[in-house]
Image (tube, rainbow, N blue to C red):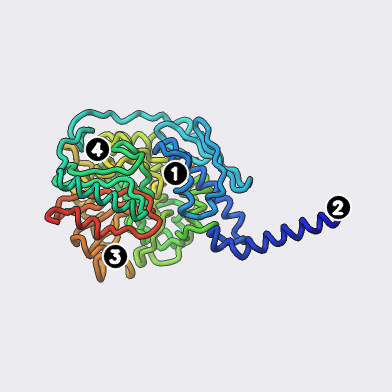
Amino acid sequence: MNVKKISLILLGGVAALLLVAALLAPRLLGFSVAQLDDAVRVATGMGAKLACSGRFISGFEPSRIVEDLASYSPANHLLELEYGDDRVSATLLGMGRTSAIYREGLGCALDIGDTGPLDRVRVTPVETNGEEWPLGSSVSSIDPVLQERVEAMLAADNRAGLQTRALLVVQGGRLVAEAYGPGIDAQTPLLGWSMGKSLTAIMLGRLEHLGLADTTATPVFSQWQDDERAGITMEDLLQMSSGLAFDETYAPGSDATEMLFNAHSASDLPLASPAALDPGSHFSYSSGTTNLIARWMHDRLGGAQANLDFFRNEILQPLGMAHTVFEMDPSGVFVGSSYIYASARDWARLGQLMLNRGELNGQRLLSEDWVARAATPNGSDNEPRYGYQFWLNRGGASPRYPQLPDDVFLMQGNRRQRVMISPSTDTVVVRLGWSASRYPTGENFARLLPGS
């Protein structure tokens, strides 16, 4: 067989493979061949970032990390992840090498552009003590009956493939039940995804309570002063009704994936987004909006070190949150939309702060008025059941979770992360996990309320 014939056979084989890929990629890989370049960049950016944080913050084994990534797209099984002492690199079939670097106390950030602000930051650990939760790390208030119920619920979740990793209940200000999946304990920081939006809002509320920020001034950003975005208020941003155009679709090439997995600055893209609707008129869920709030605080406080110090001194230390990491983008701005890792007990502290109308551990961090506004329905024409980066059970034609009290409001994140705050039953429930499909939030949480 001559060289020309071999070449023709090989070319034919490649063509056949490409044809098969074109036909099967949407079903098997989760994207089309036309999206290949974007898909590679998203896969390697997401792979490097989540693998780095999963390994160095949560302490996960590589096998668990791969399965977590593959829950988003089967193509992620093809990722090649290389783990170093403080970094992870990812390629997809040899393409799109992307790296993320771990910094103690800051977590992981993609190695994109100038990361000098991250390298210059100095982290002061949160001081801990052995006092009773929530002030310290001791827990002596477990209710045996509820503990058995929580353990059984977590086990049932995981038999059903829901991957619940932590389930915790606080009633009357006391931690009364907690259960954890394999490899997880009370100190394990777990990714909250969009529950970070609620924490970002709490930071802004703290700034407001200290008189360090005028959140009523417009324009919110000087870049908006000469166009239709000048009328957007901070409350519009908090309530996801800014009217800015932003593609929240989690697909290759979308605004959301570019922002989280390919950008040096997570806030630059939404900052440049044009106005699409009148401010305050229409609810449109946007992670870019939250990163604008984080950018605004970053600018007001004066940079990465000042923001980290504020977060540590005004949120973490007063609440006793010693197992929390709020990650920054490569430019040194908190990724408020998505990248907060915290233990179930620390997530519960945030819920208890809101349940107590802004006070915890003998300290008032938020005004009662701010907490009330945060849990008040917005005035949009399509989805009023959203407050200041909190999801509300009330305010619409029907409750979000009919099984739960009307006054319930929640932090919610991808893969069914939940912190439920129930003022009328004096209860906080935390659920952390990795559910790719529906989680029975209303049904399960109703069984954990007093009198159930």
Q: Position of residue 87 (x, y in %)?
A: 51, 35
- CA gap, disc 3 to disc 2? 69 Å
- Residue 146 vs residue 272, the one in the foreground: 146
Give the amino acid at mark 3.
Answer: Pro
Q: Quadrant of the N terminus?
A: bottom right
- CA gap, disc 1 to disc 4? 31 Å
- CA gap, disc 3 to disc 1? 38 Å
Callout 1: SS? helix
Asked whether the residues under the numbered discs 2 and 4 touch, taking CB atoms below 8 Å apart as contact, a structural biologist would say no
- CA gap, disc 2 to disc 1? 46 Å
Reading the image, the residue beneath label 1 is 64
| Residue 360 shows in the view | yes
Residues packed near mark 2 inside 10 Å, few (<14), some (14 to 19) or many (20 plus): few
Give the amino acid at mark 4.
Answer: Leu
Q: Which mark is residue 384?
A: 3
The answer to which of marks 3 and 2 sits earlier in the sequence is 2
Asked whether the residues under the numbered discs 3 and 1 touch, taking CB atoms below 8 Å apart as contact, a structural biologist would say no
Reading the image, the residue beneath label 4 is 319
Give the amino acid at mark 2.
Answer: Val
Camera-side mark, 3 or 2: 2
Query: Is residue 95 left or right of 123 when viewed as pictured?
Result: right
Asked whether the residues under the numbered discs 3 and 2 touch, taking CB atoms below 8 Å apart as contact, a structural biologist would say no
Give the amino acid at mark 1.
Answer: Arg
Camera-side mark, 1 or 4: 1
